[in-house]
Image (tube, helix red, strand yellow):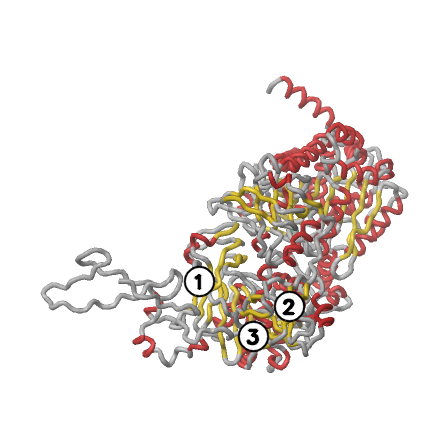
Amino acid sequence: MNRLFAVACLSAALLFAQPSASQQKLDEAYTAKIREYTTEKHFLTELVDHLPADPKVPTPEKILGYPAGTPFKLTHASNVHKYFRALAASTPRVQVFNIGSSEEGREMIVAVVSDEANLAKLNRHKDLMAQLADPRKTPPAQAAQIMKEVVPMYWLTGSLHSTETGSPEMLMELAYRLAVEDTEFIQTIRKNMIVMITPVADVDGRERMVDLYNWKRAHEKQAAPSLIYWGKYVAHDNNRDGMALSLALTRNVWKTFFDFHPLVLHDLHESVPFLYVSTGMGPYNAWYDPILISEWQKLSYHEVEEMTKRGVPGVWTHGFYDGWAANYMFLAANGHNAIGRFYETFGNGGADTRKRTVPGASTTRTWFRPNPPLPEVNWSIRNNVNMQQSGCLLALNYTARHKQEFLDNFYKKSQRSIAKATTEGPAAYVIPGDTKRPYLAADLLKLMDLQGVEYHTLNAEAEVTLKNGKRKFPAGSYVIRMDQPYSRMADMLLDLQYYSVNDTRPYDDTGWSLGYLRNIETVRVTDTAILNAGMTKLAAAPVIPTTINGAASPKAYIVAHTADNGLATFRYALKNVKMLAAEDAFEAGGQKFQAGAVIIPAENASRSAIDAAAKNLGLKITAVDAMPSVAKHDLAAARIALVHTWTSTQNEGWVRLALDAAKVPYDYISDHKIRDTSDLRAKYDVILWGPINGSSQRIVNGIPKRAGEPAIPWKASELTPSFGTGPDQTDDIRGGMGLEGVLNLRRFVEAGGLFMTIQGNASIPIDYGIVEGVSIQPTRELQASGSVLSSYVSDKLSPIVYGYDEKIPLYFKNAPVLQVSVTGGAPQAQGGPVPRVTGRGGINDPDVVQARPPAAEAPRPAPVRPGEDPPISDEMREAMRAYLPPDNMMPRTVVRWSPDSELLISGMLAGGRELAHKAAIVDVPVGQGHVVMFANNPMWRHETQGSWSLVFNAAMNFSSLNAGRKAKVSLNGSGAPSVIAHEQ
Ligand SMILES: [Zn+2]
């Protein structure tokens, strides 16, 4: 140890004030209960083993009737908020602000707790932090002054995950303690920090969780439902919205972050024992400033060490979660030059005290867990409260004592984000002004707004040098400069990701490049010349007006189709107007149109009606004098049903959100409705089954319904009023659609309906035989863990790909690999091309059988594209005649995965050859209708706007999906000729 370091340590030790035994009067009854509800002394620390009394300020017990962490007591968000308001009313050291509402209208709050002198100047401190956050406006000398004056914020957020129940209880008590306790330890926090507390991040989910818990308590002998709905749209994935900011709670958190600019956002979760303090195992997100990585370690090692000093077992770091994906809620901080971190404490999923066996792996001693959790424990919610609260207090105290250093880092990270454009680069991202999908481009800019990212438009054409040569961007191109405080957030959203398969198994998605997923070209420009181009800053994302050009009194209006999402919105806005889709490319009014262009006969809708419906949807409409002669069919405002099961609603929530965002109406129905409706076709044109994990057997059977056992309701009741505001209810969640449902679905399709599956639920029509000729292939090597992969259109006249280019970037997560083969198990369908036999000659020479007259060489099978089945011979075709569908009923592979070498765009990929050229989207005619299966997920986490139109196209063209079909198709699901000329 060198001398300087020793001095530094000594002064740190002097600064570090161990909480002294408080002279303050205690709330003896509350204190006794804390000790009673804690199962073992080693789950208590001196920081939380007591509660001071204050004659004016109410404890949680005074308002709620019980202390935080009381067995069998969970507090509704509304009552948690009530407590915070009572606290604020009683002391100048607490204030409460509304920060917005959930989708269901419930309030979110942030409470601020600090010394009264600090809170009297709250707006001043917010303003100072805002100045520090933008070094362009705040030179270093001024920043130094600010750092002396400002009292910075540390934000604690609880109960983002509704099944993780302890944090709202803990945060009430913590707020009280911070407001009234007068130990030096607490005073250090109160004087030097403004503690922000959002006790419940998912307020809808919390109400339902507490209701469900109360219901379970009242029905202890009965099977209970899981927490089927949390928020309106998603459950656990509310912590995967940090890129797309599509949920109300996320937007409220982001808005509040930009209002306060806290140094730290600390999110409280529950899962692994006993207290995991986040750092993650890596690979870390590559766009973060390395300073941030050090800050994580520093904070977390302090808490681990201090808890360990106090004899608390099982406080550890590192070995959980990677730190790669950019989609967590604490990205509000990590993506904006502050610090985002989290806890996982052990939770019982309610408020019961339970004997728990800790999974073996978590109890082993290792470098990052030198003091591991105990193998068996009697665990109470109070233990959980103690662990969370002690850790948070240590974190707050440490940050308070080191605030200069954290402020300096905050400023430095902001400076380096601005310097990024000319240091590590890139200089900017450019969305070319002549982008094909201006509406989707504007939507991406809206997201930049929400992320606090600035952008400009080019005043005139600008030329830059790219890796592969020079490129000119037209005037009006959007420029996202990297010399701004939040450049890193923009960069991590728009850059490509590469995740090595040799790294830690990824915790979540590995790739997300939003330009690709939204099907908009975003050009990464390293040439700093772009920074000197004339450009104008935009205050907000541009509105993209629809243009109507051409004839004044036309015969028809033609809407160009570019796979921009405004088209579906427009179709449904005029749902009673008859519209047609062109089945091929054509010219009209002096313009060229792609297949899928929408033709509206002028007698069907007035110009003003079209204008009103299309306003600001970014459509290009041409009025023409004559009806185009191209083949066309009805473009329907199809009646859509979106199906959910009662086993899991998580992933279909993202589909609902996409449909809502595009204003495409639908009925939201459970699989029971499929079971109970024999004539689905009378009600619906399209049934879209939201993505769901699990075998087809589990999906179809649902939760077993056994005779003699009581129903499991998910329904509003006196104990569960919050279930009534959710998306759906039922008297009994048991049973899936059953075989009755499968039959109803088959009848629906045969009668002309379209059934669409997403990802693994393709197993329903495949396993239950609604379709033939498509199977799900097992994989041995494939690893594509939430990646952006390249696909190509293999049947460009299929209505499903109207408006798309030849290549489509798609989101894919490991499965399913769809194999299209109408010959099923026929031997020829299984093998690849037969190699020549061992014999004379070179590889391309014929063999010669000795001592026999020469004979014509047996024809070798035609080479096929990798991933496709070889065509079957005429002989086989004859033999299988009874099995083979007629040509117009063959499965039609509309989109295929790209060859292995081109497959990966972003994220992780290994074993890509198992996926290469396989079907990404396949359309199987069944009776009068169709089953369309997506191996990708076209509506995922509000990131994949570029593939929404694949779903909309299929739906709106449901009655004419055979349009553009080749008369003679191959047997491997391709519209393209599969028999490649025999190469000699
Ligand atoms: Zn969680």
First of labels 1, 3 by sequence position: 3
Q: Horizontal and vertical percent for residue 893? A: 46, 68
List x then y, in percent, for residue 480.
64, 45
Marks 1 and 3, how far apart at CA: 22 Å
Dividing the image into 4 quarters, which one contains the N terminus? top right
Label 1 close to label 3 by CB (< 8 Å): no
Element on which disc 1 rests: loop
Q: Residue at x 72, y 33 (%)?
A: 407
Farthest-out residue, top: 3
Q: Quadrant of residue 752?
A: bottom right
Q: Which residue is mark 1?
A: 918
Mark number, residue 754: 3
Q: Nearer the viewer, residue 148 or 114?
A: 148
Of pointers 1 and 2, the one earlier in the residue sequence: 2
Residue 219 lies in quadrant: bottom right
Q: Nearer the viewer, mark 3 or mark 2?
A: 2
Q: Which residue is mark 2?
A: 622
Give the mark, 3 or 2, whose residue is nearer the N terminus: 2
Q: Nearer the viewer, residue 723 or 372?
A: 723
Q: Position of residue 267 (x, y in %)?
A: 69, 46
Q: Amino acid at mark 2?
A: Thr
* Label pair 3/2, CB-CB below 8 angstroms: no
Q: Residue furthest left?
A: 851
The quarter in which the C terminus is drawn is bottom left
Disc 1 to disc 2, how far (Cα)?
38 Å
Q: Amino acid at mark 3?
A: Leu
